[in-house]
Image (cartoon, rainbow, N blue to C red):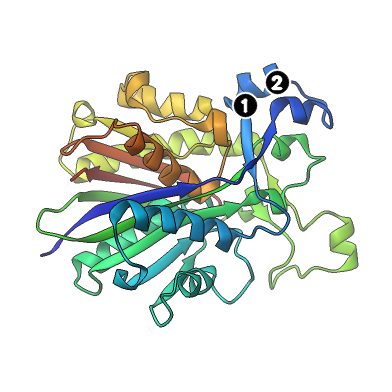
Amino acid sequence: MNGVKISAVGHYAPAAILTNEDLEKTLDTSDEWITTRTGMKRRHIAAENEATSDLCIAAARDALRNGKIAPSDIDCYIVATSTPDYAFPATACIVAAQLDAVGKPAFDMEIACSGFIYGLTLASSLIRAGVYSRVMLIGAESLSKIVDRSDRSTAILFGDGAGAVVLEAAAENSFLSSELGADGRRPETLCLLGGGSRRRLTAESLKAGEQYLRMEGREIFKFAVTKMIEATGIALHRANLQKSDVNWLIPHQANKRIIDAAAKYLEMPEERVIVNIEEYGNTSAASIPIALSEALTAGKIKPGDIIVFVGFGGGLSWGAVTWKWA
């Protein structure tokens, strides 16, 4: 069997919710301003003692339960995140251990909001190459831990959550094509400056706020629209598909206006675009698997449906995957 399919999906969002009305109390903003520009109404926020691995474990257990799969039946655990528990060890190692899958290979991927797209391509390749028969891929973020709550440009955007998928070998191949890309010439466009080997955290850097996420919003908006459209077009071409063949678009949930632009290019009616940004905000690598999980729970996606997963993020990075649901 040299094919791959998604056999189980799950997700988790923290209980605490930060609304636009809550943000009005601390920032110079309004519900109308945020909704008009982003499409966001609420975000789920991790508790102080709730780390990214905790979100991963909850989403993974949901997927395992839905698929009636034991943790030991997973051959490899991959976590896509920009907010790991620690710089090292990998969050995936902690997740596998907490799921009683000690000894299984586990590693992290750090490509920001593009994490699930990159991870889906990698996990599918590992299975199709015969390296593993079953892989769990988790996209998870606790971005509230690295957002400056006094910075209106970022504080309104980001939320926390996790989505998990189990991929396994299959006779028929669901992975139809992929297009990935990156441009690291200007990492400061979307980055966390402090804490790495280039700019270690010091009293001075903490005072300057380098421990918080930074983003050049206008540049990201233009980049996102261009690359989502471009990557989707290439992925469809590689799969020998037309726009009209696509049943569902599941994009990274970063901004409703960006999603609308991509949908317009694909000529996708609103009812065929999975959007949950109103409830979660931008959860980075978690946004696509959470949206997929909710769409499946709602009974929207049927066997044989063609799905385009598409996203962009820090790096700068981007990617699209075409997928036939089994």
At mark 2, the secondary structure is helix
Q: Residue furthest bottom?
A: 103
Q: CA distance from mark 1 to mark 2?
A: 7 Å
Mark 2: give few (<14), some (14-19) or many (20+) Cα within 10 Å: some
At mark 1, the secondary structure is loop
The residue drawn where x is 76% and y is 30% is 22
Which is nearer the eye, 260 or 5?
Answer: 5
Against 60, residue 17 (above or below) is above
The percent position of residue 254, horizontal first and vertical second, equals: 54, 37
Q: Are marks 1 and 2 in contact (CB under 8 Å)?
A: yes
Residue hosting label 2: 31
The percent position of residue 19, horizontal first and vertical second, equals: 69, 30
The percent position of residue 276, horizontal first and vertical second, equals: 48, 31
The residue drawn where x is 53% and y is 32% is 277
**Quarter-wise, where is residue 51 in the image?**
bottom right
Mark 1: give few (<14), some (14-19) or many (20+) Cα within 10 Å: many
The residue drawn where x is 52% and y is 27% is 256
Against 132, residue 194 (above or below) is above
With 36 as the anchor, is 198 left or right in this view? right
Which is nearer the eye, 93 or 200?
Answer: 93
Against 190, residue 101 (above or below) is below
Residue hosting label 1: 41
Which is nearer the eye, 5 or 260?
Answer: 5
With 31 as the anchor, is 288 left or right in this view? left
